[in-house]
């Protein structure tokens, strides 16, 4: 067996662990974590350890496929790559000619490595309708930071913090490698508050104090903490007067959030609110967990996030040692400390009057700050054809189960004139398409990848692409060529693009390619606090905005938009909804052996959790007359799914927790696609209402 090196890309790009693949006769026989890799130091999680089975999943697409049966019948015939490219090019160019470039949508699912290529392809084609899974993940966090500070992202300086606010923080299931830093800091005396509605390994192992607000009530809790911090003088007066905009309005507003009122709104006792504020006030600086999903997945999620991060500003922790350090991204959203050229590579597209990107009219703040269309408005626009019809969708990893009202999204997709998907597997969404193209895994391709700490690599394939599959970036370059786009880079192929992306760096393509391990880029910057405080914030006020001038501008333009300049708190669920169904449905808290739709049919990963489950508190189970493993039905106005009851004290009474992505129990069929955050367009995955009953018969 020959040992070859690659990376696992099953989960988030912040990780992507080093893998030693042992290969015989072109087959991967076993894998291990790479001991010398700066990221994982030999460790692999349960998902990564199943990567060999993932690569060899039985439903890998083998050749390009052309639909022969009815739309959605899943009947295809194999075609050659040449024929597939020719057909796609002809249809897309014809639609552009007839209806304008905006009628074509380019979509990316969770995978990120090819995204700047796909975005460039969309721009070169001329459509603003490039959209990605990030319309439900991470970009609400970016939007919050852009609104508050003018910079896209920050990260908690755990190593030097006095107190860590682990708000919606359970890395033991979702980000295994991230827990070590907090564990280490705790040993040297850093205090930890975990804010999570559930009991988790993080609350049990790390918390000095565990606050359990009801899902989606986080904003009220954060404003309540601010109320106590300000009242007791535990905030940084000098910092606030120098660097913060809108403090007076904000301080007046938070006065309403007394501990007693916060108890009513969140379920966290008034006494715990006081204790938490004191713990924070006496242990500064404050570092706060950055959350991509659970805080944002509510219809009030964006404002809740703002309220939480306002704590960093008022305690004088933002851009200070041990606080929240602003970061800039290198390739693919990594804070690696060097500049790659993806912004120039992606370029810009001109939007024509009357043809805003999907979601552009509905989510004006998103539209003003994020250079992507918002996919959560896609099904509506396909159905209503307003403000203009969408006629083709070209998806890379298009999975209709991503969205609330997933079955409606599938129905909408079925009605567009031309639907293409590029995926590894013949998924239920791929089965809806006219043409399906096979791509390959990280084991079968060469890719550019950066990591925090100043690392960069160009990986080499450890096996040939399986069957007739091709890497996504090759497919994108081939499509550009097939459509005859006048794009000198994409038509020159992947290597030319990578060379362009790294052309400002003091390392060469050859050097990166030759090294089995990531290369440390000379001169990469570490995390240095204070740059933004020294230079001024790139916001309208030049300060950290607790009162947002950008939102103020939008309010002038759209007086009925309903957006607030302060981090105003609104309830995630209104009283009428509360009455209709007895449970809060919180879907998606991560489980260790699953990731979205990817591993549900991979044997090792599936064996860790054979059934789709509904997690319920034993007290609720008693009321419902349920035993462990009983079949239950969870239902809303939109649908009903069957799962196994999993009785656990992790769940708080009154909330049912369900993981997403299962074809046989798709929780997103239960959710209302209109229940979205008006700032970010993010769906309320984590707080809606549902009924639960024992299944009879
Ligand atoms: N194993 C595994 N790992 C993953 C993923 C996966 O699917 N599986 N997905 C990846 C992706 S795409 C993402 S976005 C990240 C998400 O990563 P995380 O944000 O770390 O993960 P979650 O488990 O969704 O949420 C963390 C905790 O927040 C709590 N929580 C839920 N709702 C609320 C709320 O309203 N308020 C508060 N305070 N807490 C709440 C949950 O109980 C949970 O314990 O994980 C990544 N890592
Ligand atoms: N109810 C509920 N729904 C949620 C969430 C939740 O918490 N609750 N979380 C949301 C979040 S945070 C996220 S990130 C999304 C996940 O969003 P999805 O995009 O649904 O994620 P996946 O199912 O992992 O991947 C989508 C498709 O990409 C394919 N794929 C994998 N690798 C590649 C590749 O290299 N190239 C190509 N072309 N395709 C590939 C997979 O086979 C799959 O079909 O789900 C969102 N939906
Ligand atoms: Mo995500």
Image (cartoon, grey):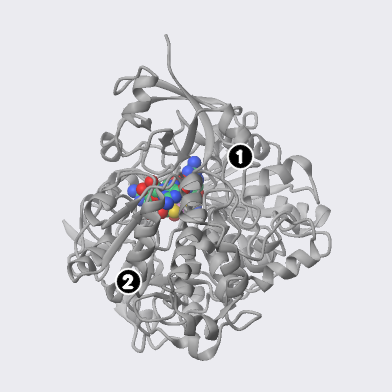
User: Residue shown at 53%/86% (left/top)?
Assistant: 242
- In the image, 151 versus 582, the foreground residue is 582
Q: Secondary structure at mark 1?
A: loop
Q: In this view of the protein, can residue 549 be seen by the observer?
A: yes
List x then y, in percent, for residue 331: 46, 72
Quadrant of residue 657 in the image? top left
Q: Is residue 93 above or below residue 238?
A: above
Q: Is residue 577 above or below residue 444?
A: above
Quadrant of residue 214 in the image? top left
- According to the image, label 2 marks what residue? 282
Task: Specify which label sits upstream in the sequence, 1 or 2.
Answer: 2
Q: CA distance from mark 1 to mark 2?
A: 36 Å
- According to the image, label 1 marks what residue? 574
List x then y, in percent, for residue 97: 81, 57
List x then y, in percent, for residue 153: 49, 71
Q: Is mark 2 within 8 Å of ligand 1?
A: no
Tell me the quarter of the image containing the C terminus. top left
* 165 horizontally vs 252: left or right: left
């Amino acid at each position: 067996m020959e040992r070859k090196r690659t990376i696992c890309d099953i989960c988030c790009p912040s990780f992507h662990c080093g893998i030693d693949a042992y290969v015989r006769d072109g087959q991967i026989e076993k894998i291990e974590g790479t001991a010398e890799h700066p990221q994982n130091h030999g460790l692999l999680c349960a998902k990564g350890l199943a990567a060999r089975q993932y690569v060899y999943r039985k439903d890998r697409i083998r050749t390009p496929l052309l639909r022969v049966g009815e739309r959605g019948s899943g009947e295809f015939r194999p075609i050659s790559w040449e024929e597939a490219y020719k057909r796609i090019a002809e249809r897309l160019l014809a639609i552009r000619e007839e209806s304008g470039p905006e009628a074509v949508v380019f979509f990316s699912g969770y995978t990120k490595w090819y995204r700047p290529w796909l975005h460039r392809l969309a721009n070169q084609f001329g459509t603003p309708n490039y959209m990605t899974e990030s319309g439900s993940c991470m970009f609400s966090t970016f939007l919050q930071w852009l609104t508050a500070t003018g910079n896209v992202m920050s990260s908690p300086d755990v190593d030097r913090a006095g107190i860590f606010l682990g708000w919606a923080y359970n890395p033991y299931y979702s980000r295994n490698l991230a827990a070590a830093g907090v564990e280490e800091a705790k040993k040297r005396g850093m205090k930890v508050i975990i804010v999570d509605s559930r009991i988790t390994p993080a609350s049990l192992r790390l918390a000095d104090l565990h606050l359990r607000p009801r899902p989606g009530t986080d904003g009220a809790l954060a404003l309540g903490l601010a109320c106590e911090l300000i009242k007791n003088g535990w905030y940084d007066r000098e910092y606030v007067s120098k660097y913060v905009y809108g403090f007076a309005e904000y301080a007046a507003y938070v006065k309403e959030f007394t501990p007693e009122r916060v108890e009513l709104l969140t379920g966290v006792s008034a006494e715990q609110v006081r204790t938490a504020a004191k713990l924070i006030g006496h242990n500064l600086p404050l570092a706060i967990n950055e959350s991509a999903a659970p805080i944002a997945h509510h219809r009030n999620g964006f404002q809740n996030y703002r309220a939480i991060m306002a704590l960093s500003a008022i305690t004088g922790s933002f851009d200070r040692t041990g606080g929240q350090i602003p970061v800039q991204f290198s390739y693919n959203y990594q804070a690696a400390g060097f500049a790659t050229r993806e912004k120039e590579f992606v370029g810009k597209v001109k939007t024509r009057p009357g043809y805003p990107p999907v979601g552009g009219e509905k989510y004006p703040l998103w539209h003003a700050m994020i250079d992507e269309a918002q996919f959560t408005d896609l099904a509506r626009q396909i159905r209503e054809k307003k403000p203009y019809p969408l006629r083709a969708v070209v998806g890379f990893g298009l999975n209709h189960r991503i969205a609330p009202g997933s079955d409606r999204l599938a129905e909408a997709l079925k009605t567009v004139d031309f639907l293409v998907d590029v995926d590894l597997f013949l998924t239920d969404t791929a089965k809806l398409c006219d043409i399906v193209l096979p791509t390959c895994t990280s084991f079968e391709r060469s890719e550019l990848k950066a990591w925090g700490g100043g690392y960069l690599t160009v990986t080499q394939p450890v096996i040939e692409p399986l069957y007739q599959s091709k890497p996504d970036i090759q497919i994108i370059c081939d499509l550009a060529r097939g459509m005859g786009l006048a794009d000198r880079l994409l038509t020159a192929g992947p290597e030319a693009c990578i060379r362009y992306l790294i052309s400002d760096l003091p390392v060469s393509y050859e050097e990166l390619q030759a090294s089995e391990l990531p290369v440390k880029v000379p001169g990469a910057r570490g995390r240095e606090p204070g740059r933004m405080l020294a230079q001024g914030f790139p916001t309208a006020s030049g300060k950290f905005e607790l009162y947002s001038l950008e939102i103020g501008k939008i309010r002038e333009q759209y007086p009925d938009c309903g957006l607030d300049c302060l981090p105003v708190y609104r309830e995630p669920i209104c009283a009428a909804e509360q009455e209709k169904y007895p449970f809060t449905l919180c879907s998606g808290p991560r489980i260790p052996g699953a990731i979205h739709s990817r591993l549900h049919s991979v044997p090792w990963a599936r064996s860790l959790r054979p059934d789709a489950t509904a997690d319920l508190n034993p007290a609720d189970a008693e009321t419902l007359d349920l035993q462990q493993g009983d079949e239950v039905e969870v239902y809303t106005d939109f649908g009903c799914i069957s799962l196994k009851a999993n009785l656990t004290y992790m769940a708080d009474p009154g909330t049912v927790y369900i993981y997403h992505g299962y074809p046989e129990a798709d929780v997103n069929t239960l959710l209302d696609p209109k229940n979205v955050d008006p700032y970010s367009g993010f769906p309320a995955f984590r707080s809606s209402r549902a009924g639960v009953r024992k299944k009879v018969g």
